[in-house]
Amino acid sequence: MAGADFRSSDGGGGGGGGGGWREMKRFGLQVLLGRWFMVFASFLIMAMSGATYMFSLYSTDIKKSLGYDQSTLNLLSFFKDVGGNVGLLPGVINEVSPPWVILSAGVVMNFFGYFMIWLAITGKIAKPKVWQMCLYICVGANSQTFATTGALVTCVKNFPESRGSVLGLLKGFVGLSGAIMTQVYHAFYGNDSKAFILLIAWLPAAVSFIFLRTIRIMKIVRQANEIKVFYQLLYISLGLAGFLMILIIIQNKFRFTRIEYIGGAIVVLILLFLPVAVAIKEEYDIWKSKKVVFSDPSQVKIVTENPPEVELPLSTQPPESLPSNASGPAATSAEKQTSCFENIFKPPERGEDYTILQALFSLDMLVLFIAATCGIGGTLTAVDNLGQIGHSLGYPSRSITTFVSLVSIWNYLGRVVSGFASEILLKKYKIPRPLLLSIVLLFTCAGHILIAFPSSNSLYFASVILGFCFGAQWPLMYAIISEIFGLKYYSTLYNFGAVASPVGSYILNVVIAGDLYDKEALKQMKALGLTRKDGEDLTCNGVQCYRMSSIIITAATLFGSFASFILTLRTRKFYKGDIYKKFRDEAEGAENVTGSSGITTEERKCEARGGHR
């Protein structure tokens, strides 16, 4: 009877219409629950998670509306950087809860932080104190770490053998988020710059809320064309980046009307949603293979053999005096021997799952953190000061806007290129990622040198180099962490790596670049016979404003490159091996109970009973 029901739902006859509708519903459910749709949802979340990169677009409104001086605005910017990069809390929460928990927290924090800022600058609430504004922007920016931890870490765990490509694509969409949201803002609100803060309050929160239950840890399933699918998604994102680049250049040269902004935003959104077509196609191929298996069960190969016994190394064998079914005091004694505090300085082999403390106290992590602090901190300092660097060198305001756009687009390109290229070089030629990070940091020095010793139009080239290198460093650092220290506590370790950014930024930007800039500005005022008044901005002009700080940053970046090279030497044997072997073994173990199309035995039983009901 069940078999008759199954055939009538698949075939023609009188029940063909109802069966077809049921098939469509089943296929739609498979798409929504599939891992490729989860990747698409992650793209959208990441594309809305770049509010911290858009501070320059709304900082002037904060300064004018609340009557702040430049030092107070810089204080807000610092708390924005702290909130946007210190994500240890979402990392720890994600270790003990499903991704929808931290995504939900991110939704609340994002809306609260930026909505309160919007209420303040529009005069809808009493003028907040400075510490309150610092709190609002820190909370709003910190929501980004909740969203990225929920989406990015989950994707890496679901696609462990393609982690470089995953990291490159997802971090690339963060790089594009500023350009994407700017186009959406112009379409919704025209040129009302205060409304831009309202947009970044509700839009990222809405996107994360819609996909709360879509982002989840899924069983690892090997798919032969997995890397090809990621390349298809890469090509779509490149098309989106190219269109945004052209659109930004045209908008800088011509004045757009509201209708033209809406038209441009529609094209941007179409390209942004295009990956869903790839997800539907992949799920349709899987669905067709399932139908073939269900109609011809003889094609299913079920392997039920027991796994071979593995002889444990002497160091991991249990004591002979402790039987396998031991309990009580003896078992408690064994547990004490593996206490997390006692094992801090006894980490496992590289590539195995470190505990959080083992990773944090690891020499490998220390070296990587130093390299990231010098490299990312120095590049972020140059990017944050690009506007003032341009003004000090006499570039017009339109050129400053072009610099920011160049950094945004090349930031994206750096992320996707480093993610995909490092994956290819690692798999085919066993070139370790720490070596690539060292090369990227060396290339970054060229951008800093162009700022220290500028020539005609050299800042355009510096913007391209620094944007590309800033983007390229992030996927490399995150992939290195996942490969050396494992994926078990990746949520926390991923966010610990991000702490290098504000640490480096504070040292190189606030302490060094800012102080040297002010000293040079005061020297210029003194030479002109002027005296600075309280609350008056300091403005520096000429190549000396950032020359010494750029030289210091270049030296720090060289030191970071050297530190990364040391990590290369320490891990060269590890990267010469097959670092993805254990993930393939896990996937092959899962395939032992599946058919050639990836159908589990349980699914076949369910279908045989009429599981489509």
Image: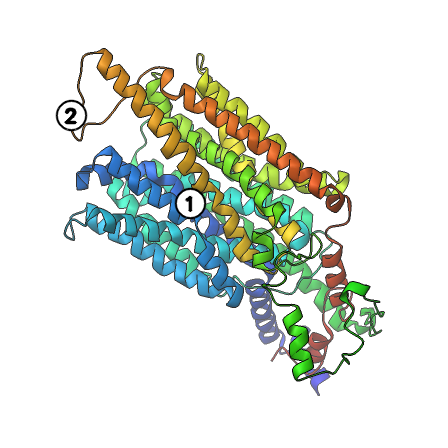
Determine which of the numbered discs, if any, sits on residue 229 in the image: none
Residue drawn where x is 56% and y is 52% of the image:
360
Residue drawn where x is 58% and y is 55% of the image:
155
- The image shows residue 279, relative to residue 59, as above or below, that is below
**Residue 442 % position (x, y):** 59, 27
Cα–Cα gap, marks 1 and 2: 37 Å
- Residue beneath label 1, please? 50
- For marks 1 and 2, the one nearer the N-term is 1
SS of the residue at dot 2?
loop
Query: Which quarter of the figure has residue 179?
Result: top left
- The image shows residue 235, relative to residue 38, as above or below, that is above
485 displayed left or right of 193: right
- The type of residue carrying mark 1 is Gly
Q: Nearer the viewer, mark 1 or mark 2?
A: 2
Q: Tell me whether circle 1 and circle 2 mark residues in contact (CB < 8 Å).
A: no
**Residue 364 % position (x, y):** 62, 46
Q: Quadrant of the C terminus?
A: bottom right
SS of the residue at dot 1?
loop
523 displayed left or right of 438: left
- The type of residue carrying mark 2 is Lys
Front residue of 536 and 408: 536
**Residue 134 % position (x, y):** 28, 48
Residue drawn where x is 61% and y is 67% of the image:
339
Crowd band around label 1 with a 10 angstrom C-alpha radius: few (<14), some (14–19), many (20+)? many
Instruction: Pick out the residue farthest to the bottom.
Output: 1
- The image shows residue 399, relative to residue 185, as above or below, that is above
547 displayed left or right of 123: right
Determine which of the numbered discs, if any, sits on residue 533 in the image: 2
Query: Which quarter of the figure has residue 526?
Result: top left
